[in-house]
Image (tube, rainbow, N blue to C red):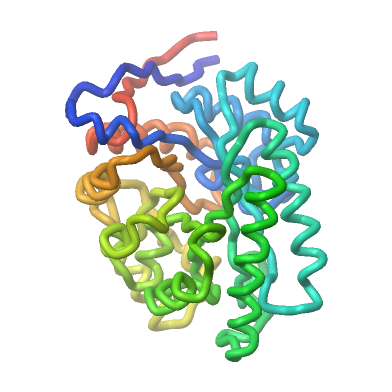
Amino acid sequence: MTQTSVQVQDLSRNPDPRYKKLVVGTAPDSWGVWFPSDEKQIDWETTLDQMAAAGYKYIETGPFGYFPTDPARLHAEVSKRGLTVVAGTQFGILHKEQEWANTEFEMRRNAAVLKAVGAKFLVYLPPMFRSDKTWEFTDERVLSEEQWQLYTSNATKLGKILKDEYGVTMVVHPHGDSHIETRTDIDRFFADTDPEYVSFCLDTGHIVYGGEDPINIVRDYPQRIGFVHIKAMDPDLVRQAHEKDWPFGEAIARGASVTPPAGQPEMKALVDALAGLDREIIVVVEQDLYPVEFDFPLPNAIATRQYLAECNLGARAAATAERN
């Protein structure tokens, strides 16, 4: 059996020390994982094996329940592969009063695991108004003023709980088919939330999907960016998705999320902008691939990692083959 792995060397192409402050990781999303359990998804052990084989050291856990949720077991599984958990992700409904108790419970459960394994970030995913599996509408496309105010006040409330009680920073993630998608949505969300407790996950692909250039967000809100998901979108498919009102899940199934250097944003300029912030930022490499053939993620992860290294993001990587 042939297993592909990556040998990692120190980045030497650009001696500017600001680039070395960008800490590179990966996430189950790049292995086609959107749900805690799904027959179309690769098993979690293989995902961890391949994350390590692709040369990564830092990972995000993805949907809660996909990887083990017992902290001792999770730590053991990642450690034996030379991996470290830096973040988790969690959907949660904040704009409906009756959903607060469940959202708080799920966020606390996730944060407790993250705290136990030493991770410092929880990526908050806004609920989508269309299901990412059935593509059917599950909520109103536009929130009322009352719903928006509840959304933002609960975001600050939740961020305070996570920071004060778990030492975990909540980083809010924009998302297609959600109420935090466009630049207008992001501007308003920033204006209505407390930056002490609500940070931002700059997901470059979703920013493009929402019609904005992520470099503009870096320029205009440098202090709000606490975490990054780096990915690219095909601008032609994104345009079709909006013109034809495709659900986000359909856009992804049609191939909207692409492997750099294809798509937007242009990665070299983006990495330069992130390095210009001149502080340590975790940059998680992602690609929305649900569903995906199981033999695609590993070579794709290696190719993406190599290309981003050419853009001065992370260590320079060279693929090798090892025969078992």
Camera-side residue of 60 and 192:
192
**Residue occupying image coordinates x 60% and y 71%:** 128
Quarter where residue 220 is shown: bottom left
Quadrant in which the C terminus appears: top right
Residue occupying image coordinates x 64% and y 16%:
80
Name the foreground residue: 211 vs 195: 195
Instruction: Give the position of the N terminus as an image quadrant.
Output: top right
Q: 270 above or below 205?
A: above
Q: Is residue 104 above or below residue 60?
A: below
Using the rendered image of the protein, determine whether residue 237 is visible from the camera's viewpoint. Answer: yes
Please say whether residue 261 is visible from this viewpoint: no
Q: Is residue 200 above or below residue 15?
A: below
- Report x, y in % for residue 71: 76, 32
Question: Where does the image place residue 308, in percent across and percent down from the top left?
Answer: 30, 38
With 9 as the anchor, is 132 left or right in this view? right
Residue 303 rendering spot, x and y as whole percentages: 35, 34
* Quadrant position of residue 41: top right
Residue at screen point 77% across, 26% down:
72
User: Viewed as shown, does residue 160 lie left or right of 9?
Assistant: right
* Total count of labels: 0
> 214 left or right of 283?
left
Residue 23, relative to residue 293: is it above or below?
above
Measured as percent of width and height from the top left, residue 138 is found at: 69, 79
Q: Residue at x 39, y 68 (%)?
A: 209
Looking at the image, which is closer to me, 230 or 185? 185
